[in-house]
Amino acid sequence: MSVLDIVLVPDPVLREKAKKVAKITPNVQRLLDDMAETVRKARGVGLAGPQVGILQRVIIVEVPRDDEDPNAQHGFFQLVNPEIVKRAREIEESAEGCLSIPGYIGDVERHVSVEVKALDRSGKPVKVKARGFLARVFQHEIDHLDGVLYLDRLKSADKLHKLPPREEMQDETDVVA
Ligand code: NI
């Protein structure tokens, strides 16, 4: 496995629509594994194909267990062709960052729960019912596949905040995707 370079704004690749994966080949599986290693190294919770310059519909989501909130959903997902098939009507605004937009965080409205349909790394169909923070990360990553950034979803300019240097923001390192 290897760590990939993360593409940063304003690279135009982040604004392109990624293509569906036609067949899960060993190359696609290697990409999923490299992306998993990359997101861990970057201490993020999610990564999408376009963020490593690959316009394919693949995402990694890894939300760790939250000791302070044992009811919060967590898990590790390597998904191909993910699609949101259900969304709660209820929305929630919360802080969100992006590995492709270092140094910033935004308050973004997202559906409180979503159902995601996808293929896993072996090509098996899977359905994930996600709520809370996990649901937020799925929405953020699937947006990346359509060239959408959280910046596009900010209700106003004052919802975007500049972060102090990352080493002083240990608490915030878990919200970048
Ligand atoms: Ni992102």
Image (cartoon, grey):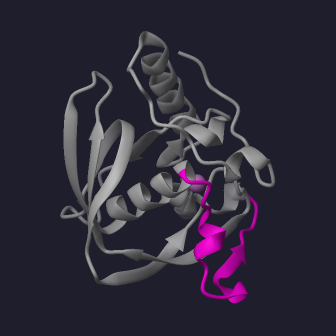
- State the image coordinates of residue 160 (x, y, percent, origin top left): 68, 78
Quarter of the rendered image showing ligand 1: bottom right
Residue 52, magenta (yes or no): no
Residue closer to the observer: 49 or 61: 49
| 159 shown above or below 33 | below
The residue positioned farthest toward the right in the image shown: 10
Q: Where is residue 95 in the image (x, y as percent from the top left)?
A: 52, 73
Q: Residue furthest top?
A: 26
* Residue 137 drawn at (x, y percent): 42, 58
Which stretch appears magenta?
A: 146-165
Taking the image as shown, residue 153 lies to the left or right of residue 84, namely right
**Is 158 contained in the magenta span?**
yes
- Give the camera-side residue of 34 and 72: 34
Please give the name of the residue rendered at 62% of the width and 62% of the height, measured from the top-left corner: 149
Residue at 43% in and 11% down: 26
Counting from the top left corner in percent of width and height, residue 27 is at: 49, 14
Decide: is 170 above or below 30. below
Q: Which residue is drawn at the image coordinates 71% and 57% (left, top)?
A: 101
Q: Is residue 177 left or right of residue 80?
A: right
In the image, 70: left or right of 165? left
Q: Is 102 placed left or right of 93 in the picture? A: right
Identity of the residue drawn at 63% across and 63% down: 169
